[in-house]
């Protein structure tokens, strides 16, 4: 009895903690629910390298993540897909076209000097100073109306820039961004402090242009050019509609299941519904704590796990009814029902979890969401179907005989034979004495 009370207290603490998490933590919603852009980038081979390596893709992923973070949008996803592709999901983005342009730019910053070419014409040559030598970039102003990009070099870049400006005093130094000439100021004196500014030429930068260049420079140049090969957008209206339909489908499904459990299993069915409610609280709290990004596929996995949780209770209750028909006491029948159903429940749930692991390891982001929510749901459903339901059954029915068979959806004559057969056993046989 003490153990059952202790288990009940643990369940109560879990319920209170789950409610607290649900009320205080924000739910992460996927792209298909809140709207946004899903972009697939493919790394492009160049003349100087014929093969896209694993290291290149990892560095490309880091660079793209920095660029995505520059949008200031939460819940973004950047993940590798196959050998040379990245999947980028940006929810709640207001300008998907700008995002595409921003992510696709190589952001290659170069400082060049002017030299004579083979034909005697002036050409711009690479000086060895590039965006790799930057420490940070910020937006600033040169005059009251002129926006500029202020750059600060790291230790190596500071020395390179100092040597370069010493050599180019009285000569122009060109600044190229993505192979485009941005400005070509004449160096008046050596610059030794490791900082400089980039102006937008005669017209100057617009503030948006300056900010975009700063974001790109701080995110770093792409280690390999990347081309957008697939892009689709989901509007917030469609996402809201999906949420409403998912809520409606879930409510209808759960209501029908609860009605069936009470109609067919009576009091145990009512207890199963309480356990199902507790299951919902725990699983939703876990989704917020992990956190799990909920998508339509993820919600489908969650709803499917609810059905599996109820399925476990059905196996338990049917086993318990069989024990009652055999003439067991109520306490013994409940324990036997749970013990004998456990193997079937464990086996079926383990096969589901194994399938979820395979789907999560090999599937796309949408499939991963389904697999993760289903796996978490199955694990929690085993706890609620076995521990919570069993504890509540014992607390409600105690250890006595079943005086009201209808509480279990049984008729008196269905269990009378079992009790009668038990009562007709000779007293000596009951005591273990043979005639």
Image (tube, grey):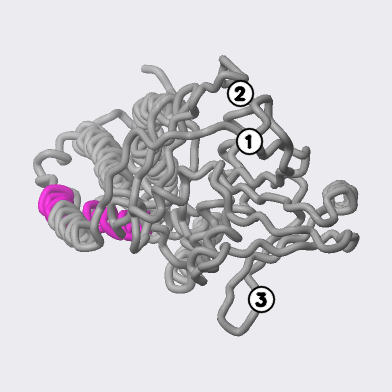
Give the residue number, with chain letter if any, for mark 1.
59
Secondary structure predominantly adopted by residues drawn in magenta? helix
Q: Earlier in the sequence, mark 1 or mark 2?
A: 2
- Relative to residue 10, is residue 377 depicted above or below? above
Among the 4 quarters of the image, the one containing residue 121: top right
Element carrying mark 3: loop
Q: Residue 367 at what x, y percent from top left? A: 35, 35
Q: Residue at x 62, y 28 (%)?
A: 56
Question: What is the C-alpha distance between the residues marked 3 and 2?
Answer: 43 Å
Element carrying mark 2: helix
Label 2 environment density (alpha carbons within 10 Å; few <14, some 14–19, many ≥20)? few
Among the 4 quarters of the image, the one containing residue 287: bottom left
Give the residue number, with chain letter if any, for mark 3.
142
Q: Residue 323 at what x, y percent from top left? A: 27, 35
Q: Residue at x 56, y 38 (%)?
A: 61
- Relative side of 428 to 415, left or right: right
Residue stretch in magenta? 255-280
- Relative side of 78 to 120, left or right: left
Foreground mark, 3 or 2? 3
Label 1 environment density (alpha carbons within 10 Å; few <14, some 14–19, many ≥20)? some
Q: Say whether residue 266 is magenta.
A: yes
Give the residue number, with chain letter if any, for mark 2.
54
Q: Residue 78 at what x, y percent from top left? A: 49, 43
Q: Are marks 3 and 1 in contact (CB under 8 Å)?
A: no
Element carrying mark 1: helix
Q: Residue at x 26, y 41 (%)?
A: 304
Nearer to the camera, 114 or 239: 114
Work out which quarter of the rendered image holds the C terminus and state it.
Answer: top left
- Relative side of 410 to 243, left or right: left
């Amino acid at each position: 009895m003490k153990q059952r009370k202790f288990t009940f207290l643990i369940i109560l603490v879990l319920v209170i903690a789950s409610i607290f998490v649900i009320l205080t933590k924000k739910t992460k919603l996927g792209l298909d629910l809140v709207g946004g852009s899903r972009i697939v980038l493919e790394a492009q081979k160049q003349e100087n390298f014929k093969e896209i390596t694993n290291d290149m893709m990892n560095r490309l992923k880091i660079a793209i993540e920095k660029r995505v973070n520059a949008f200031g949008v939460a819940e973004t996803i950047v993940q590798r897909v196959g050998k040379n592709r990245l999947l980028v999901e940006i929810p709640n983005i207001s300008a998907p076209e700008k995002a595409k342009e921003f992510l696709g730019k190589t952001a290659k910053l170069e400082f060049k000097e002017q030299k004579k070419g083979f034909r005697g014409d002036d050409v711009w040559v690479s000086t060895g100073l590039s965006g790799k030598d930057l420490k940070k970039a910020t937006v600033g102003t040169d005059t009251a109306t002129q926006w500029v990009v202020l750059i600060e070099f790291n230790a190596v870049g500071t020395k390179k820039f100092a040597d370069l400006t010493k050599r180019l005093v009285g000569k122009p130094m060109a600044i190229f961004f993505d192979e485009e000439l941005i400005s070509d100021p004449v160096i008046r004196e050596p610059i030794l402090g490791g900082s400089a500014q980039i102006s937008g030429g005669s017209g100057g930068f617009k503030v948006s242009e300056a900010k975009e260049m700063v974001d790109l420079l701080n995110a770093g140049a792409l280690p390999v050019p990347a081309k957008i090969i697939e892009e689709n957008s989901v509007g917030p209206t469609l996402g809201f509609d999906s949420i409403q339909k998912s809520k409606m489908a879930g409510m209808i499904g759960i209501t029908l299941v609860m009605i069936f459990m009470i109609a067919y299993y009576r009091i145990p069915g009512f207890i199963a519904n309480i356990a199902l409610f507790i299951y919902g609280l725990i699983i939703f709290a876990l989704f917020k704590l992990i956190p799990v990004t909920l998508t339509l596929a993820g919600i489908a996995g969650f709803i499917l796990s609810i059905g599996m949780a109820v399925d476990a209770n059905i196996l338990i209750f049917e086993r318990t009814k069989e024990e009652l028909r055999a003439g067991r006491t109520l306490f013994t029948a409940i324990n036997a029902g749970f013990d004998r159903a456990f193997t079937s429940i464990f086996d079926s749930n383990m096969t589901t979890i194994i399938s979820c692991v395979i789907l999560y390891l090999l599937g796309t982001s949408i499939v991963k969401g389904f697999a993760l929510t289903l796996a978490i749901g199955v694990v929690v459903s085993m706890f609620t179907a076995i521990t919570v339901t069993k504890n509540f059954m014992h607390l409600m029915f105690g250890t006595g005989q079943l005086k009201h068979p209808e509480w279990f959806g049984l008729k008196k004559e269905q269990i009378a034979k079992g009790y009668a057969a038990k009562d007709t056993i000779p007293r000596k046989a009951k005591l273990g004495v043979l005639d």
